[in-house]
């Protein structure tokens, strides 16, 4: 017993001694000029070959044996800082990195080197790249820039819809400051809702999902807003062809509280007013038409440092698209009485999100983020008509109105812990809960005429659901060559007394072959409890978000990926990945189903099936120097199978494109002039096209109906798509501000790219023959915009 | 509408550009189209025509000189179809029998020959029809027995006859719209209250396979005196081909012209061709007089 007691004391003293030999260095990494968090910035100790990356709030923590070290703090586009740190106790060190002026930086130590990180299928999009590329109508768009990466597709010409590795548009978890956004599209998908001036960081994950992410099966697009400079006021703004925007940020309370506010609005409605006035003038009399379309975005964020260990953030976004058309015509019935016909139609849709977050640092190793959030998406369309005698507007002879409303509302909260017990381990864990309210389409109809009255509503009733998740992951080193991220995400869903749950293991590995190259592999199981019923090729706001129910199961995904990454000299790096993905319980509308004009519940209009997707992606990048950018290539196949569609046979997915190439380059001549070039090529999307016609069975005395025969869903390939965009930015720095003229040419050689195909007649065709027509959208579009910042 | 066009083209100069895409119509070979539904007391007829590529812009040609053979279940020739005009061919031999399989083969010029087969289902007897009146509506409960050993397909219609005096006593027929629960039937228009309505309902035995079936249907009879109309129920047993074709054909017609509707693939059981060769048998209930 005595010997046991002595042994226990020796073990205890040894453990305490061990603990006392290590200390933790922690703090925040921020932009020296703007004060923004440098998400993913790197902290590296060369002598120990150990490093960490800053989290989403710029916080880092690294535990090292006591001693003196040269520690390198770095981030892409910033001048790295090397500091000699004497570590003999826990130490807080906040570092601000300045903008790098060296265009020919040889050694890029930026965020974690690709070939050293366990991250796979991940791309951090520099906002500087988003701002320097040529764009349509001069509107920078984060989602359109992501579409230039291998493995990421746009739905159709001009659309900002995202299709990642064969997945659908509902399978992308798009988050703004950690809050999911359900419809990230303006103008029917031509622009996204993200104002680039308000955004600090964008990360795209296509596979190898860390366990902290869940809820969608194809991708994560994690977008973080700027926090606001705590030291001085900054602002940016721009005036473009179709929209203007501004962003203002700065301190409310110096070094304690900052704000960021940004807004954007289009002016189609203002620009169209003279043309509408001309039309009214030509009509003459009391007849009038009016209308217009606009969208706007508003972002707001407040960031307050309570003390060294506590910060709170309040962020919000609201945006709307509004389309309205009204008309009024006079009718003279010949008896001297005057009548009026008035009609009004329109649609509006938009998102609102609010997030309140609290960061708490328990100690140098344990960091907590608590978030409470609200997210809402609503779509509303309607049409009204009335016919009345002059002076009797309140008692019309005929009146009808139609209104359709759908949407989704979430209230949620979560806890995310980051724990750094050891340089070789970064542990994250957390839980969260979201309360969903789904409103998948309610139609109301009112009609009155000559005493007949109809007042009815039909469609799906509200559905309420709880979604709960938890996760645990560890990013760790196994020896000197292997970096791994292993974890599990579990989620539960309760709807209409039906309970679903899913355990989702995740693992990704990086095996360093040499100091410059590595092989990666990953597996991820994912689950999604929401579906998006989409009925058209463009991002119509009429697409419905619906929950899983007692009869509609969750989507499941499995993705395996293997890849190779290599760093070269002069900032070049290359990576290639092959992936295979299986998706279960996908939804498609039944043959003939239409979400408009139907009284049936959406559950009766769908089929449930499966899909697979596989391919190879190659990416060659250069991140430093005068010439930067990337060349990407994707070879892929994507298929679907539904027992009751296409006679039970596999068919290609709508967005199955065999080859995709993107060349994205920017060249910085000097601080005043830079150019951007984008060239994209993709083989055609698959569309359903009837190629033969024949007589159907005569079923009535009016003879046969001609049937256009479809031998297979998505049986026909559209022509290939390619486009060249050019951009020129001329910067004019002044004492306290800088102005930039941006000239861009979208579709520089005016290629008529396919938007959709149909059988019909060409206008002004003397032969008047039926042809297969291609409808194209955008020819060459030159734009000029002016932006400024201070 | 013209008034709106002043605004639309201004916006559309950038948004609409059309051009012809070459469609290799030479590679789209026309095929023989066979349309025939046979019963047990009808003359057996078939409509034959040619298909064309989708750009063809004229009346689809009827086939008037094909060699069309009527076959038994073993593929033996029972007789020939004779052309009577406009691509309609008749077989005037023995009347087809229930429970038997039949086939058709058609050869015509350079076209690939086509064939199809069907089995005439055994008619199912309506054992009872209960009715009750609810205002201007008449509710029916139609009883029959489904065979659990087979996959069966049905259609139901309800008709009526009354005597109309216009100088002479003339028998007039009425075809009613039926209302039935959505979960039972496979076609019809949803009225938003869990019911569908149609002139003829098609359904399979998936919801009740085997055993006694009580099929509910409601018709609107109006304010007329019930005892002037004699009702009857027609229960058809359909071949699988006929059922699938009819459902898909109806969906196709409903979806035509609706840009928001999903495309519909119309079913065909004609090998190397298009169309349908199906069959049915039917049972007509006794006349129902509502007290």
Image: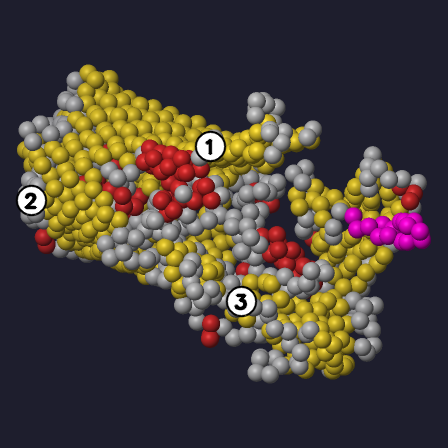
Q: Secondary structure at mark 2?
A: loop
Q: Which mark is residue A285?
A: 1
Q: Residue B191 colored magenta?
A: no
Towards the viewer: A768 or B286: A768
Q: In this image, A302 relative to A442: left or right?
A: left
Q: Secondary structure at mark 3?
A: loop
**Residue A56 x %, y %:** 26, 33
Q: Which mark is residue A207?
A: none
Q: In this image, B94 relative to B113: left or right?
A: right
Q: Chain of mark 1?
A: A
Looking at the rendered structure, whether the residues under marks 1 and 3 are on a common chain is answered as: no
Rendered residue at 51%/50% (across/down):
B259
Q: Earlier in the sequence, mark 2 or mark 1?
A: 1
Region in magenta: B160-176
Foreground: disc 2 or disc 1: 1
Q: Which mark is residue A670?
A: 2
Looking at the rendered structure, whether the residues under marks 3 and 2 are on a common chain is answered as: no
Rendered residue at 70%/41% (across/down):
B195
Q: Which mark is residue B57?
A: 3
Towards the viewer: A512 or A445: A445
**Residue A322 x %, y %:** 41, 33
């Amino acid at each position: 017993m005595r010997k046991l007691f002595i042994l226990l004391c020796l073990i205890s003293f040894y453990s305490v001694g061990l603990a006392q030999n290590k200390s933790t260095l922690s703090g925040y990494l921020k932009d020296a000029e703007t004060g923004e968090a440098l998400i993913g910035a790197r902290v590296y100790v060369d002598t120990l070959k150990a490093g960490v990356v800053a989290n989403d709030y710029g916080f880092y923590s690294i535990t090292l044996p006591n001693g003196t070290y040269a520690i390198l703090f770095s981030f892409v586009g910033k001048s790295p800082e090397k500091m000699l740190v004497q570590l003999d106790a826990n130490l807080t060190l906040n570092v601000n990195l300045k903008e790098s002026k060296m265009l020919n930086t040889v050694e890029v130590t930026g965020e974690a080197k690709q070939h050293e990180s366990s991250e796979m299928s991940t791309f951090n999009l520099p906002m500087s790249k988003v701002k320097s590329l040529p764009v349509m109508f001069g509107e920078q768009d984060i989602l359109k820039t992501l579409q230039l990466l291998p493995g990421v597709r746009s739905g159709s010409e001009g659309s900002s819809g995202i299709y990642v590795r064969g997945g659908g548009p509902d399978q992308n978890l798009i988050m703004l400051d950690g809050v999911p956004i359900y419809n990230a599209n303006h103008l029917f998908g031509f622009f996204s809702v993200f104002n680039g001036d308000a955004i600090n960081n964008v990360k795209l994950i296509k596979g190898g999902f860390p366990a902290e992410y869940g809820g969608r099966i194809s991708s994560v697009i994690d977008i973080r807003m700027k926090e606001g400079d705590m030291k001085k006021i900054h602002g940016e703004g721009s005036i473009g062809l179709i929209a203007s925007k501004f962003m203002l940020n700065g301190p409310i309370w110096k070094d304690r509280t900052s704000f960021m506010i940004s807004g954007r609005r289009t002016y189609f409605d203002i620009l169209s007013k003279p043309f509408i006035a001309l039309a009214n003038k030509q009509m003459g009399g009391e007849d009038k038409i009016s209308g217009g379309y606009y969208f706007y975005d508003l972002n707001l964020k407040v960031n307050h440092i309570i003390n060294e260990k506590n910060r709170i953030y309040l962020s919000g976004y609201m945006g709307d698209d509004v389309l309205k058309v009204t008309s009024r015509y006079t009718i003279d019935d010949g008896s001297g009485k005057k009548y009026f016909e008035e009609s009004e139609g329109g649609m509006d849709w938009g998102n609102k999100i609010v997030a309140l977050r609290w960061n708490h640092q328990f100690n140098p190793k344990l960091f907590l983020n608590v978030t409470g959030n609200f997210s809402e998406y609503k779509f509303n369309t309607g049409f009204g008509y009335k016919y009345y005698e002059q002076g009797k507007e309140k008692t019309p002879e005929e009146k009808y109105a139609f209104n359709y409303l759908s949407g989704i509302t979430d209230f949620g909260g979560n806890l995310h812990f980051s724990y750094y017990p050891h340089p070789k381990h970064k542990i994250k864990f957390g839980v969260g809960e979201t309360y969903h309210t789904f409103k998948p389409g309610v139609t109301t109809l009112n009609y009155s005429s000559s005493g007949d009255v109809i007042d009815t509503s039909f469609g799906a009733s509200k559905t309420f659901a709880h979604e709960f998740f938890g996760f645990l992951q560890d990013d760790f080193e196994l020896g000197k060559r292997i970096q791994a991220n292993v974890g599990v995400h579990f989620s539960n869903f309760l709807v209409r007394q039906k309970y679903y749950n899913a355990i989702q293991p995740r693992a990704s590995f990086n095996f360093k072959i040499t100091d410059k190259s590595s092989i990666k592999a990953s597996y991820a199981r994912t689950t999604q409890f929401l579906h998006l019923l989409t009925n058209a090729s463009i991002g119509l706001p009429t697409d419905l978000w619906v929950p899983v129910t007692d009869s509609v199961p969750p989507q499941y995904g499995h993705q395996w990926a293997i890849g190779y990454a290599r760093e070269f000299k002069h900032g070049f790096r290359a990576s290639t990945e092959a992936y295979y993905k299986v998706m279960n319980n996908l939804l498609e509308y039944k043959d003939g189903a239409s979400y408009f004009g139907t009284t049936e519940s959406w559950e009766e209009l769908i089929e449930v099936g499966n899909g697979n997707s596989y391919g190879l992606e190659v990416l060659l990048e250069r991140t430093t120097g005068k010439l930067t950018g990337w060349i990407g290539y994707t070879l892929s196949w994507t298929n679907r199978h539904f027992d009751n569609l296409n006679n039970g046979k596999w068919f290609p997915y709508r967005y199955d494109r065999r080859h995709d190439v993107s060349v994205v380059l920017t060249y910085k001549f000097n601080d005043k002039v830079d150019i951007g070039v984008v060239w994209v090529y993709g083989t055609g999307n698959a569309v359903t096209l009837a190629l033969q016609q024949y007589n159907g069975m005569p079923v009535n005395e009016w003879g046969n109906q001609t049937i256009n025969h479809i031998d297979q869903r998505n049986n026909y390939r559209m022509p290939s798509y390619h486009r060249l965009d050019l951009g020129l930015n001329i910067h004019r720095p002044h004492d306290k501000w800088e102005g930039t003229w941006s000239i861009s040419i979208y579709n520089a050689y005016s290629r008529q790219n396919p938007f959709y195909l149909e059988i019909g007649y060409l206008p002004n065709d003397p032969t008047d023959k039926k042809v297969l027509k291609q409808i194209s959208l955008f020819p060459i579009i030159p734009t000029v915009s002016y932006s400024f910042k201070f | 509408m013209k008034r709106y066009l002043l605004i639309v083209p201004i916006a559309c100069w950038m948004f609409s550009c059309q051009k012809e895409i070459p469609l290799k119509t030479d590679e789209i070979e026309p095929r023989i189209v066979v349309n025939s539904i046979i019963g047990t007391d009808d003359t057996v007829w078939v409509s034959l025509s040619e298909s064309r590529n989708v750009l063809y812009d004229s009346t689809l040609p009827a086939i008037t000189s094909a060699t069309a053979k009527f076959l038994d279940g073993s593929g033996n020739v029972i007789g020939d179809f004779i052309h009577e005009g406009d691509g309609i061919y008749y077989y005037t031999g023995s009347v087809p029998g229930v429970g038997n399989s039949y086939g058709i083969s058609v050869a015509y010029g350079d076209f690939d020959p086509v064939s199809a087969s069907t089995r005439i289902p055994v008619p199912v007897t309506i054992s009872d029809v209960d009715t009750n009146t609810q205002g201007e509506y008449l509710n029916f409960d139609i009883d029959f027995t489904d065979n659990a050993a087979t996959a069966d397909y049905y259609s139901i219609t309800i008709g009526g006859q009354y005597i109309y005096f216009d100088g002479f006593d003339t028998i007039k027929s009425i075809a009613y719209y039926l209302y039935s629960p959505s979960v039972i039937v496979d076609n019809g228009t949803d009225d938003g209250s869990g019911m569908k309505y149609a002139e003829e309902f098609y359904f399979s035995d998936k919801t009740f396979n085997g055993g006694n079936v009580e099929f509910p249907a409601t018709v609107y009879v109006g304010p007329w005196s019930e005892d002037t109309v004699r009702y009857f129920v027609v229960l058809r047993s359909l071949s699988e081909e006929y059922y699938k074709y009819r459902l898909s054909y109806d969906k196709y017609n409903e979806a035509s012209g609706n840009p928001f509707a999903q495309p519909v693939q119309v079913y065909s059981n004609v090998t190397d061709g298009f169309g349908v060769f199906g069959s049915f048998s039917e049972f007509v209930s006794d006349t129902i007089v509502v007290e």
